[in-house]
Image (spheres, grey):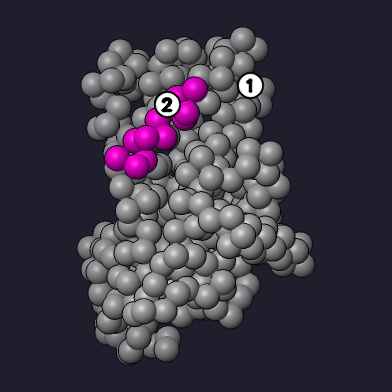
Amino acid sequence: MSHTLDGSSEELGFDHHDPRFVADPDRVSGPIREEHPLLRSERYGGFWLLTRYEDVTAAALDHESFTSAVVGTTIIPPSQPRNFPLLPIELDPPEHTLYRGLVNALFSKPRIEALRPGLEALATRLLDRVAREGGGDLVAGFANPMSLGALARFMNLPEEDEERWFDWVERMFSNALLDRDDQREAVAGAEAYIDALIAERKEAPREDFIGLLLEAEIDGHRLSDLEVRSFGVLMLLAGYETTSGAIGLSLLHLAEHPEQRAALFADPAGLSHTAVNELLRFISPVQVFCRNAAHDLDLHGETVAFGHGRHLCLGANLARLELTIMIERVARLFPDFRLDPERPPTWKPRGDIRGLASLHLLA
């Protein structure tokens, strides 16, 4: 039997992109979790849903039973229609270990920390404008350009290109649900952009993300251009959407809980590390991640046949740095904000990777 968002029977079943889930996942999934540790939904071609922490973490660590190595099904429905794996997330060990190892050094804490001065300057510039205007849409005015700027600095992309790949990524995510033809056009644009970067780095090598991948080897063989492109597209997708979402959701939470905001802003330097970890735990933009059963599995009396671990986010250090800078700079430049009662927050359409479409705050 399948279930609706509130656990009652329905032909299609649970939909993580339902607006009610997007706006408040815990209100929806909490009651389901109590009664249904395992749910079957016929949405998007059909899937099973694990609802409890212990089962989810066990599945994330067990790649022999719950594999990532099925192209295009790590999110439902896929954000990027394709017939090749998105590297390295659509691989299992040992291949995943090899490919992820190629870029681990780029995501080290010292290398990410070197981006701090530029990101602090960017955050100050963005929030100065918000403060001068007495508030505004903090998604368009801060979360999006902050995430874009961080990713551009990390990947060594031209600042003037930010709006182009912002448009592609937004359409690749949202239009998987709304307009598949336009989604395909956005995918083609992003892939062509990465291909052009690959050609430029071959002509004039640089020690940056694309340049390092072009020099990398797996078992004595250089990566193909398709493999380098796959890495690059993943960075554009995951590097922007999740971090922008985390910034927006964090600001919304702090606006809705002024007592927590006051305590945090009273000592941002001392509390930001703990606050970032708690915000990411409590309002995580990633609510649903997908695996495929590698063999028939017996879970909670059901045979599942669809036939935190190693996939810990590569960009976690960069995301934490952006959120830390957000806390420090908002505490200094825009501390006493509140929700605009005439313009409530609006949401993007996806529920697996949640994000605000707008967040109007007033000083």
Dot 2: element: helix
Query: Residue flagged by tag 1: what amino acid is it?
Result: Gly
Percent x, y of residue 138? 58, 28
Q: Residues within 10 Å of mark 1 (few under 14, many from 20)?
A: many
Instruction: Tell me the residue at 47%/35% (across/down).
Output: 247
The image quadrant where one finds the C terminus is top right
Dot 1 or dot 2: first in sequence order is 2
Percent x, y of residue 17? 56, 58
Percent x, y of residue 133? 65, 12
Residue 239 seen anywhere in this rendered image of the structure: no
Residue under numbered circle 1: 136
Q: Residues within 10 Å of mark 2 (few under 14, many from 20)?
A: few
Instruction: Tell me the residue at 29%/81% (across/down).
Output: 65
The image quadrant where one finds the N terminus is bottom left
Residue 195 colored in magenta in the image: no
Q: Quadrant of residue 84?
A: bottom right
Q: For this view, does 311 lie left or right of residue 147?
A: left
Q: Which residues are magenta?
A: 110-121
Q: For this view, does 275 lie left or right of residue 339?
A: left
**Majority secondary structure of magenta residues:** helix
